[in-house]
Amino acid sequence: MRSGENLFVERFMRDLTARNPGEPEFHQAVQEVVESLVPVLERHSRYLDHRILERIVEPERVILFRVPWIDDRGDIQINKGIRVEFNSALGPYKGGLRFHPTVSLGALKSLGFEQIFKNSLTTMPMGGGMGGSDFDPKGRSDNEVMHFCQSFMTELSRHIGAGTDVPSGDIGVGGREIGYLLGQYKRLRNSCDGVFTGKGIKWGGTLIRPEATGYGAVYFADEMLNTRGESIEGLRVAVSGSGNVAQYAAAKCLALGAKVVTLSDSSGFVVIDKGLTQEMWDEFMNLKNVRRGRVGELSSLFPGVVSHEGPGIWSVPCDVALPCATRNEVDGDDARTLLDNGCTCICEGASMPSNPDAVEFFVKKKVLYGPGKATNAGSAVISGLEMSQNSMRLSWPGHEVDERLREIMARIHETCRTTAAEYGRAGDYVTGANIAGFTRVADAMIDQGLV
Ligand code: NDP
């Protein structure tokens, strides 16, 4: 990066940090985006003239509220409720609700900020937002979770709606919580207006929701490989994690004829040198979703599976890496090991699984590196498709939703690729994703005036 660009980013970040003290996650999310926007700001002075950067980092509205409820022992409990309505230039605020003790305003602002660009990349009419509470559903009874959700929604219901703000789930907010939240919303508003996405399939949800993120990441990887005249079929793919994203990334790899050679969880990883079979995948789903066991147990069921404890998954030779477990699971050393062993494509299923060292290395080495903002947009795409189906009062069959998902992921890939090339950074999907996501929102903000 040139020194003038450095100075610009430094000055902007100094100001942002002073205005938003104690929010390190938010500072990190903004810095990553602003650094790659310098070329677009240099080329199009209208973004500077309209002070789009200063405006886009300021949420349109933040709602902070008290959530009082009574636990099973009859004791009064108080939690924090937060909804960050970040940007509505492209459509209603759209983003998850997280219930977890680590929830803070800074953490939610960082996620809401990312969501603006992810939603923009889908080209669907969705703005960006995020919300949640420091309430921890773990260890709470269904009754306690219901009472908490009802109290939370009693306040939130004033601020959301199908045309205003459409929340979905995130960590700690699954089908059970969405059911309770939606039930209370309907009772208060007397309306079934499709205000949530991620709903149960029997009450307004869409098919392919559980599969969306994993499938979408594999579609994106395949598109990246196509640019080099390859496809994922027959390649050795290292998948990390064994949760929702990893499970369906592995399933789509199997369907497309790729060889899944690893899976992992927080205890360790397994190597399947000859590749995961359908029988193994079925058992893996049973192990993780029903028996709640450790991934290493697969080795006692299948002779071709070797179990290893602890980290080290990225030392397994592969052609394609799909990190689908957790933030910062690939560091600089892992990145070097992957490339030394012949890996040419890294496509993120998780959010920010590669740390900044690893990202810098992948971009410098010009391998195919797809950042999560673009590659795991499958969940955002499916949310948009659920909103469309609710508005039309229709339920599309699974194959139709999957086809649309594939088409939209291909379009996101193409947008990132062509945008990077247009700004002289051919093959740099990080720059492509950030600039493409930003310009769509920025142009809409200019068109809509100073609001
Ligand atoms: P899950 O909680 O279902 O699964 C996470 C998996 O990662 C678990 O298998 C967990 O192991 C494993 N894991 C956690 N920490 C480590 C670690 N240090 N080393 C190795 N494995 C680890 O989450 P999801 O699959 O839903 O999400 C995965 C990631 O994708 C998250 O970053 C999430 O934010 C992101 N994401 C998810 C979306 C979705 O639709 N689900 C959408 C967009 C992003 P264990 O079983 O031992 O806990």
Image: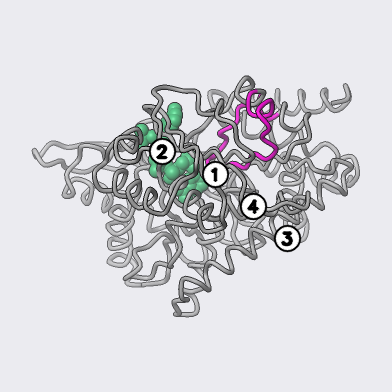
- The residue that label 1 is drawn on is 349
Q: Is mark 1 within 8 Å of ligand 1?
A: yes
**Left or right of 373 on screen, residue 425:** right
Q: Amino acid at mark 4?
A: Phe
Q: In the figure, 106 relative to 114: above or below?
A: above
Q: Amino acid at mark 3?
A: Gln
Give the image location of residue 167, x and y in percent: 45, 55
- The residue that label 3 is drawn on is 448
Give me the C-alpha separation between circle 4 and circle 1: 10 Å
- The residue that label 2 is drawn on is 304
Q: Amino acid at mark 2?
A: Gly
Residue sitting nearer the eye, 12 or 391: 391
Q: Residue furthest top?
A: 333
Give the image location of residue 277, x and y in percent: 43, 50
Among the two numbered marks 2 and 3 on one chain, the one whose residue lies closer to the N terminus: 2
Q: Does the CB distance between marks 3 and 1 fall below 8 Å?
A: no
Occupied quadrant, residue 19: top right
Q: Amino acid at mark 1?
A: Gly
Among the two numbered marks 3 and 1 on one chain, the one whose residue lies closer to the N terminus: 1
Magenta residue check for 109: no
Q: Of circles 2 and 1, which is in front? A: 2
Q: Residues within 10 Å of mark 3 (few under 14, many from 20)?
A: few
